[in-house]
Image: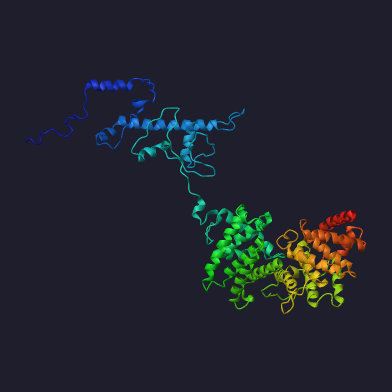
Amino acid sequence: MDAKTHSPSAHDRPLPLLAKPAARLAAIEEGRNATSKQRRPRKPASSAAARSTLFWVHSDPQSVSGGTREETLKRIRSHVMSEHNRKKRLENTKRYNNKPWKNLAFQPVESTPSTASSDRSQHSPVDTTSSQSSQDTTPERDGVQFSACVQPKQATKNASVLPARVPMGSVSPPQDRYYPVKAPDPWAYLGQGSKDPFDMMPVALSDRMLRHLQHFLCDLTRAAYPLQRHSKSKLQSHWASLVQTDPAPLHACICCAASNLAVMSGDLPLVDPTKRWSSPLVFDSFQHRGETIRLVNQGLSDPARASSDALIAAVSILITIEIASGNPDHLKIHLAGLRQMVALRENLADVAPDIRFQISWTDIRVSCLTLTKPIFPFVRYARPSQLPNLVPDRNAPTTASRLLSLTQIPGILGDALVEIIYDLLELTLYGEWVKSGTLYSQELLSEETEDYFNTEVLYVEYSLHNDRYTETGALKGDSSIEGCVRLACLLFHNTTIWGFYPQMAVVFPRPIIALRNALESTILSGSYVLCRDLLIWLLFIGACSAPPYFAERSYFVSELASAVSLHGLQSWQELRALLLGFFYVDRCYMIPCRELWDEIQMVQQRR
């Protein structure tokens, strides 16, 4: 064989890198079998003795080879685990100290640190129920959901510098803590969150905006039609579609709701204009009013949107808001603008029925506030053909009977007012049946009948305001029996149907003041010598409509005491029996009648 065939193979070659001296092997073996030595106590943290024994890994070229040795990796793992265990001990101690039941006789079994650690590894959210101590620097956790803490292994894997080991009993710096990470709100993925989960609104809604919008859609829309049984959901759907398509009616509805709440709380009308920002409701009302005006002016610059239902509805609601603020100058500006916008349509009947109802309601409320003639023509519905004659209840045979008997006397009541009295009588009977829940006929429960009578509510009040003027527009005057009866019917209508008086008397005081002035002149002229019962009813309606702090109420009560004494009434039952011959319902006037009788007795005793 040649030299190639007799050369040693690779298995026969020596391994000098793995070979070690026998003495060194024996020392290593002896070190493994020996018991672990007791660790020396750590020196106090001062100067160089407190410095960490760790070093930069994979950043210094000279330490690259030493950083992957087994003993170096052991030191790293030992440091990380000791930090991890120290933090767990601190967390468990803090949790135990903050337990409210730790001083009780019975204490629930606490989980061991290992169990708690395993539970946290299985569940991603961290337990955030423990309260914070005064020294805790953890961020606020109230009402916030957190995800899992960053694990130490993950931290050492991603970090290039290992944190220094902190002695027991000391507080680690904030940057070395493993803070829980705030999880995103699930509603953040759905539009505007829980307020608008499907992103239907044209603008983002805050909490207060949402509450005001809910008050408008759920409360104010139900009060829009006073005699409704079928129109609740339909009216809510109508306004909900408007606020979703255009931001102008959205801000107008929010402003209307805030103004309504401000009126109910007594913040509106403003007594002191310098305190308009002291109430959040007044602030929201003025803020969204300004935004509505800006959006309406922006929409009026577009000919395609100038006469849209959304802008007309927004301006109509703005007028309602100005009614609550009691500013006649702003009312005239908005009414003129609304009239021009409606004029762009062919006629008022071309507007959607619900928006037309809002326009008529606003126009009539302005007339009640300023005691002027309505500016918009009224679109009256035809009487349903299947509507039967209303059968009166046990009090109905006498309801308005005495008032209607005055129509037989020439020159006392005009033909237009007599027709209004008949319409008001039918509306009062239907309204009391609806509000008492005693409707007997299926025809009276139909949606067509309901729409007809809800429109009649506005038409009767429209006719009462319009009857104060002649065909040429001249004011007839209220200083007559007809004028006093007209004003009393207006107050009765707004009390029994809308419930405005006496609660909203501060907003609509003009009819009360006008009735007082008309009664003063007619009583002095002796107009009620032959009909003192009519005078008693007029004074009774005025006294029940005016709140106690109105000066007009004192006048009504004083004159009523004199009229009752002259008529010879001895009890409140006799007073009630007399009032049943006019417009009177126990639902609204029974309690005021008894209270008013007590006041009359006190006035008579003082005399």
Q: Quadrant of the N terminus?
A: top left
Do we see residue 110 in this rendering? no
Q: Is residue 588 left or right of residue 191?
A: right
Q: Position of residue 261 (x, y in %)?
A: 65, 56
Q: Quadrant of the C terminus?
A: bottom right
Foreground pick, 395 / 120: 395
* Residue 436 pos. (x, y %): 78, 61
Q: Quadrant of residue 594?
A: bottom right
Q: Residue furthest bottom?
A: 472
- How many marks overall? 0
Q: Is residue 50 left or right of residue 218?
A: left
Colour mapping: rainbow
Is 265 located above or below residue 419 in the figure?
Answer: above
Residue that appears at 36% across and 37% down = 156
Residue 542 pos. (x, y %): 80, 63
Task: Check the image and report above or below for 377 versus 329.
Answer: below
Q: Nearer the viewer, residue 201 or 526?
A: 526
Which residue corresponds to the image point at 67% horizontal and 73% vertical from the top-left? 375
Q: Is residue 7 left or right of residue 347?
A: left
**Residue 461 image-quadrant placement:** bottom right
Q: Horizontal and vertical percent for residue 248?
A: 56, 65
Q: Quick check: 477 left or right of 154?
A: right
Examine the rendering and report whether any part of residue 596 can be seen.
yes
- In the image, residue 283 above or below residue 174: below
Q: Examine the image and state in which quarter residue 6 appears.
A: top left
* 65 vs 480: above or below: above
Measuring 55% from the left and 72% from the top, which residue is drawn there? 306
